[in-house]
Amino acid sequence: MTTAHELPVPLLSVRGLSVSYAAPRKGTHLGTGAALAEADLDVRPGEIVGIVGETGSGKTTLARATVGLVAPAAGTIAFAGSDVGGLRGRARRAFRRSGQVQLVFQDPLRSLDPDLTIGEIVREPLDIAGTLSRAERQERVVESLRLVGLDPDAVLARHPRQLSGGQRQRASLARAISTRPRLLFCDEPVSALDVSNRNLVLNLLDQLRRDLDLAVVIIAHDLSSLAGIADRVAVFYRGRIVEQGPIRDVLEDPAHPYTALLTASAPSIGDEDRLRPDQLKPAPDAPAWPADLGCGFAHRCPFVHDACADQPRPAPLPHAPARQAACHVATTWRERLAPPHPHKESA
Ligand SMILES: Nc1ncnc2c1ncn2[C@@H]1O[C@H](COP(=O)(O)OP(=O)(O)OP(=O)(O)O)[C@@H](O)[C@H]1O
Ligand SMILES: [Mg+2]
C-alpha cells in the first residue's frame, strides 16, 4: 500500500489564497470583509489533513473557496494539477458539478433538504453530474449508504428529521461520496455528536479514505479530536494559517505560541510546561486586528518583540522542513523552554 508520504505530488495545492466577503459580518478578523489571508496548503492523495482554529478563523472559508462556492480575491487553487481557483462562470459550475471535490457542511440538519428523502438527497449530486444512467445512480446510492454504515432499506425513504444526529452525519457523508470524489472536505463532522458517535464517524472517515482512495480535510475546533486520525494539521488563527506539519510533531512540540496554547488545552496531551491561558496578555478592547498591524497573535503573545509588527509568513522550521510556522520567534516549544529565552522577560 502506498502512503501519503510516498506521493509527493499534491492533489490539492493552495497558494497565497485570500478571500473577502462582499458584506463583512461582525467580527471579521482581517479588516474589511477579509476572511482568509495568504493561505498555503497542500493535500496529497489519500491523506487526512486536519484544520483547527477558533470560530471565525477562516476554516470554512478555505473549504468553500476550494470547492468553488466563493471566488478567491487572490492566490491560486490547483486541483490534480489544474487551476480551479481561476475558473469562472460555466467552467466553475462544470467543475462543481463533476463532484471531484465535495464538501460536507457543518450542520447536517440545516444543510440537508428536509423535504427530500435520504435516497433523493444522496442521489442529487449524481443527478447533477449527469454521468451515470438511472440504474447506475440507484446502485451508487445504495452502495454509498452501505459504505457509511447505513442500512439502505431502513433509510432510503426517510427524511432527515427522522434520523438520529449520527445517522444524519452519515447520510451527508453518503451524499458527498456518491460522486466518488478524490477530495472531501468535512466541516466539523463531529462537533455536534456525542463522544461515542464522534469516534465512529472519525473511524468511518479513515475507512472511507482507504476504501475510496480519498483525501480528506477535516475541520475541527480542537486538536485533540484530530490526534488519532489526521496525518497533518494546519492551525488557523484570525484568517491565517499560523502553523502546519505532521500532527504528532505539532501536538508533541508546537512551534507557534498559539498552537502551544491549543495543545495546552487538549487534555490527553499533558505537558504542564505548555503555554497557559493565564500567561497570555489580555485581549485588547478592539476585536479586529488589521492585517497591516503585523502578527495577529502579537497582542496576546508573551514573546512579542519588535519584529512582530511585521506579519510573518509561514516558514519551514530550520530543523524540521516538513513543518511551518508563521512566527518571528518560531522555535519548537521544547527548544523555547530549554535555555532562557531572550524574549521571555517581556511576558
Ligand atoms: N457569507 C459571509 N459573509 C460575510 N462574512 C462572512 C461570511 N462567512 C464567513 N464570514 C466571516 O469570515 C470570517 C471567517 O469565517 P469562517 O466561517 O470561515 O470561520 P470558521 O473558522 O469556519 O468559524 P466557525 O468555527 O465558527 O465555523 C468570519 O469573520 C466570518 O464572520
Ligand atoms: Mg466554519
Image (spheres, rainbow, N blue to C red):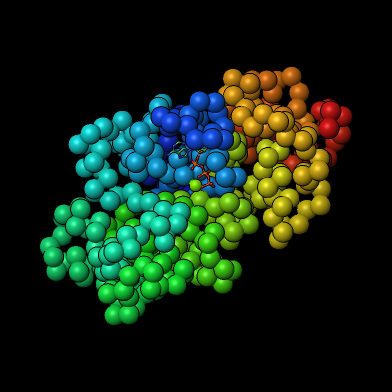
Residue 265, how many percent across, how many down?
A: 72, 52
Q: Residue at x 48, y 58 (%)?
A: 189
Q: Is residue 232 left or right of residue 170?
A: right
Query: From what the image shows, is residue 112 above or below residue 153?
Result: above
Question: Is residue 27 shown left or right of residue 278?
Answer: left
Residue visible at 41% across and 53% down? 105
Q: Nearer the viewer, residue 291 or 47?
A: 291
Locate residue 66, reporting x and y percent.
38, 41
- Determine the residue positioned at 66% across, 50% down: 251
- Placement of 75 over or under 63, stated as above or below: above
Q: Nearer the viewer, residue 274 or 211?
A: 274
Residue 325 lies in quadrant: top right
Q: How many marks?
A: 0
Residue 209 visible to the viewer: no
Of the 4 image quadrants, the one containing the N terminus is: bottom left
Q: Confirm whether residue 251 shows in the render.
A: yes
Q: Position of residue 6 (x, y in %)?
A: 45, 49
Where the C terminus falls, by quadrant? top right
Q: Nearer the viewer, residue 124 or 318?
A: 124
Q: Is residue 189 left or right of residue 223?
A: left
Residue 170, by quadrant, is bottom left
Q: Is residue 129 left or right of residue 232?
A: left
Q: Residue at x 50, y 25 (%)?
A: 32
Q: Quadrant of residue 155?
A: bottom left
Residue 15 x %, y %: 44, 31
